[in-house]
Image (cartoon, helix red, strand yellow):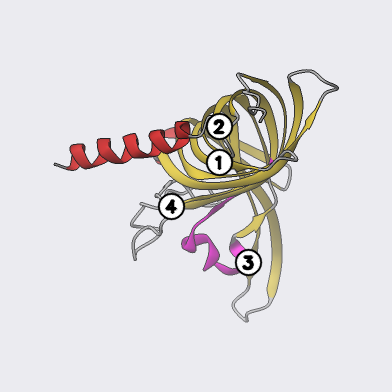
């Protein structure tokens, strides 16, 4: 019964999309890349004080996508390769028996996740080239590299097994297209915000697993990811129908 209802709903949507002959039905092929500010948040880190703090990190993604518009309403799917980096910083303070500070050691660390992103969007566009997109995104983690630096000492480790193999996130984006002369090509510029709503798991700023009961006795907290980025790309549009003249 659910399949019948879903099929009927899809047929209704498609009939509305194609009912108006004056709609400009277009297909867009996208090639794009983005620079992003990225984080991994976990309460085990947030509650640890000066031992573990978040730091700014940058990541990059590139890939291609297809958008199909029925008038001003459309749908899209993309495949993007790249990374999601999380950076941390902190200090270890050593005190003597009287409580006096005897030494302080600063450190920095980061996690670099190699990922593939597959977003699926519901899209709206305007006559002047602006667009809005929103939808879910499936993220696949292929590798997780941990890097630690303190007082000139560096440590690197592959920690892929400590992270989830995949996770879901919600994505919202907006931007514009600028036509190139009178051709079918356009330059795309925009911004995207992403937030993970499934557990990415992983390690803390010192490379310790959140599931380690000897470190986090109250159990692991959920790890979520956040991304804010700028996107630049090239779009080729074809299949546009001209409006009928009276």
- Residue 42 among those drawn in magenta: yes
Please say if 193 is above or below 217: above
Among numbered discs 3 and 1, the one appearing first in the sequence: 3
Q: Which residues are magenta?
A: 36-51
The image shows residue 144 at horizontal and vertical percentages of 51, 34
Residue labelled with disc 1: 123
- Identify which residue, 15 or 173, lies in the foreground: 15
Contact, mark 1 vs mark 2 (Cβ under 8 Å): yes
Q: Which one is nearer the viewer's eye here, 76 or 103?
A: 76
Measured Cα–Cα span from mark 1 to mark 4: 21 Å
Residue 98 visible in the snapshot: yes
Residue at 42%, 43% (x, y): give it: 168
Q: Nearer the viewer, mark 2 or mark 3?
A: 2
In the rendered image of this protein, does residue 192 appear above or below residue 33? below
Q: Which residue is mark 4?
A: 197
Sequence order check: which comes first, mark 3 or mark 4?
A: 3
Mark 2 and mark 3: Cα distance apart in space = 50 Å
Q: Earlier in the sequence, mark 1 or mark 4?
A: 1
Q: Secondary structure at mark 3?
A: helix
In the rendered image, which residue does mark 2 sit on?
69
Q: Residues within 10 Å of mark 3 (few under 14, many from 20)?
A: some
Is 244 colored magenta in this rendering?
no
In the image, which is nearer the foreground, mark 2 or mark 4? 2
Which residue lies at the image location 60% right of the left edge and 63% below the top edge? 51
Badge number at residue 50: 3
Separation of disc 2 and disc 4 at Cα? 28 Å
Q: CA distance from mark 3 to mark 4?
A: 27 Å
Q: Quadrant of residue 239?
A: top right
Instruction: Tell me whether the residue at label 2 lies in contact with that at label 3, contact meaning CB atoms closer than 8 angstroms.
Output: no
């Amino acid at each position: 019964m659910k399949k019948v209802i879903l099929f009927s709903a899809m047929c209704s949507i498609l009939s509305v999309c194609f009912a108006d002959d004056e709609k400009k039905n277009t297909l867009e092929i996208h090639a794009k890349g983005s620079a992003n500010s990225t984080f991994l948040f976990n309460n085990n880190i947030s509650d640890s004080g000066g031992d573990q703090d978040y730091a700014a990190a940058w990541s990059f993604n590139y890939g291609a996508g297809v958008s199909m518009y029925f008038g001003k309403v459309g749908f899209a799917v993309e495949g993007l390769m790249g990374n999601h980096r999380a950076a941390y910083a902190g200090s270890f303070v050593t005190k003597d028996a009287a409580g006096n500070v005897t030494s302080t050691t600063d450190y920095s660390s980061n996690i670099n996740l190699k990922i593939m992103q597959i977003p699926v969007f519901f899209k709206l566009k305007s006559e002047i080239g602006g667009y809005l997109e929103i939808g879910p995104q499936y993220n696949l983690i292929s590798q997780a590299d941990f890097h630690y630096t303190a007082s000139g000492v560096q440590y690197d480790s592959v920690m892929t097994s400590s992270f989830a193999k995949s996770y879901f996130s919600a994505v919202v984006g907006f931007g514009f297209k600028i036509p190139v002369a009178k051709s079918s090509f356009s330059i795309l510029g925009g911004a995207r915000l992403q937030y993970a709503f499934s557990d990415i798991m992983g390690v803390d700023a010192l490379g310790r697993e959140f599931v380690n009961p000897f470190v986090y006795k109250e159990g692991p907290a959920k790890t979520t990811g956040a991304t804010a980025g700028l996107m630049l790309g090239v779009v080729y549009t074809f299949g546009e129908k001209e409006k009928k003249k009276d």
